[in-house]
Image: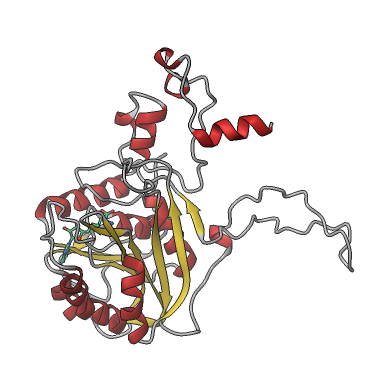
């Protein structure tokens, strides 16, 4: 699907903050950009910080040192956040010698100490990923959504999702017989079923369509535009500033621009920065293709070759749990 911003008067990407910019993207350190921002400027910070996993763009350090390094950045983010603003902090786990350290739990107190208030701990559930052999395979990450005050922007209508049973009716009381749901759909809840990486799902479910999924870039950890879009639409209004201090290939900035919000970010790695510039320009040119928001996750019909039991497994050894279920049928 082609995405075109509905209105855009300025089509340039500035390399420093100015209050009348539409997009600011800096190839440099997050702290350097933050220093240049006035207090209470930004309506939404949405980001996925480096997870300290030893990816190409990060040096792995102890968990204590990692969190200590993030504290001054988060304090700066709180400073530049508007009173009505939100921070969406998307993280997974840090794993050391097979032990799991849930980053959201470790981060929580840093935000709390700055006076921020948690509104949701959103579970982002996805269907595919690495298979673990000595623990259960991880299939979710989280987004901590904090607000700066109790007077915060929350627009539920633009992010409603179709309800499962729209025909449900009140069965008693003054509204008896009337539809009980909302004609615009239901609250998306705090569990989000958004594909981790559409191209990977597609690779498994519909072989050879990887090339049709241009959200994929060279970045090892980019998140889907759809995930950022939901935060942008729910927590900002048009023309507000959306900031991603760890911009990667620009996903948060793209989501912001798609919905007529000002976008700002910093990315230290030149190659990701360049891709981010290209993607924003492609959005403006109408050539950036993204997975449409709310598109249902693909469910195999069973007819796909990859959904069928291999011929070599004609007499499969059923796991014990399934054997028991079969007995009670
Ligand atoms: C988890 S990735 C974010 C990916 C991003 N959400 C996307 O969809 O492309 C974290 C990014 O932060 C960048 N980074 C790490 N430390 C940084 C710093 N101090 N300042 C700016 N960028 C940094 C890394 O190079 C990496 O691209």
Total numbered labels: 0
Q: Nearer the viewer, residue 65 or 289?
A: 65
Quadrant of ligand 1: it is bottom left
Q: Is residue 255 above or below residue 321?
A: below
* Image location of residue 326, percent across then percent down: 62, 30
Q: Position of residue 188 (x, y in %)?
A: 56, 57
Q: Position of residue 286 (x, y in %)?
A: 34, 43
Quadrant housing the N terminus = top left
Residue sitting at 36 percent across and 70 percent down?
105
Q: Quadrant of the C terminus?
A: top right
**Nearest the eye: 164 or 45:** 164
The colour scheme applied to this rendered structure is secondary structure
Q: Is residue 46 among the parts visible in the rendering?
A: no
Asked where in the image residue 141 lies, by quadrant, the reply is: bottom left
Residue 33: image quadrant is bottom left
What's the residue at 37%, 43% (across, down)? 290
Residue placed at 30% from the left, 38% from the top? 214
Q: Between residues 250 and 93, which one lies in front from this camera angle?
A: 93
Is residue 35 at all visible to an observer of this figure? Answer: yes
Picture coordinates of residue 45, whole percent (x, y): 33, 70
Compared across the picture, whether 216 is left or right of 7 comes to left
Position of residue 171 relative to residue 200, above or below, is: below
**Hey, which quadrant is residue 2 in on the image?**
top left
């Amino acid at each position: 699907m082609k995405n075109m911003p509905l209105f855009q008067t300025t089509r340039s990407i500035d390399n420093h903050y100015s209050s009348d910019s539409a997009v600011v993207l800096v190839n440099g350190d997050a702290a350097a950009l933050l220093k240049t921002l006035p207090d209470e400027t930004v309506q939404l910070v949405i980001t996925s910080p480096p997870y300290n996993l030893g990816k190409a763009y990060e040096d792995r350090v102890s968990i204590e040192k990692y969190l200590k390094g993030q504290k001054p950045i988060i304090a700066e983010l709180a400073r530049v956040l508007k009173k009505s603003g939100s921070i969406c902090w998307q993280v997974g786990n840090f794993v050391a010698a097979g032990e799991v350290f849930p980053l959201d739990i470790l981060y929580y107190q840093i935000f709390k100490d700055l006076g921020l208030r948690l509104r949701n701990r959103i579970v982002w559930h996805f269907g595919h990923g690495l298979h673990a052999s000595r623990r259960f395979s991880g299939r979710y990450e989280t987004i901590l959504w904090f607000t700066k005050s109790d007077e915060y922007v929350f627009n539920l209508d633009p992010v409603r999702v179709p309800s499962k049973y729209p025909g449900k009716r009140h069965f008693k009381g003054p509204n008896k017989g009337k539809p009980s749901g909302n004609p615009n759909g239901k609250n998306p809840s705090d569990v989000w079923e958004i594909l981790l990486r559409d191209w990977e799902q597609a690779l498994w479910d519909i072989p050879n369509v990887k090339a049709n999924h241009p959200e994929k870039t060279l970045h090892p950890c980019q998140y889907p535009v759809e995930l950022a879009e939901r935060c942008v639409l729910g927590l900002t209004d048009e023309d507000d500033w959306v900031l991603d201090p760890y911009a990667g290939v620009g996903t948060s900035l793209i989501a912001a621009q798609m919905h007529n919000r000002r976008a700002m970010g910093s990315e230290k790695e030149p190659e990701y920065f360049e891709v981010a510039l290209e993607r924003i320009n492609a959005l403006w040119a109408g050539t950036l293709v993204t997975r449409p928001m709310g598109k249902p996750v693909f469910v195999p019909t069973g007819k796909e070759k990859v959904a069928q039991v291999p011929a070599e497994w004609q007499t499969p050894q059923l796991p014990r749990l399934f054997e028991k279920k079969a007995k009670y049928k």
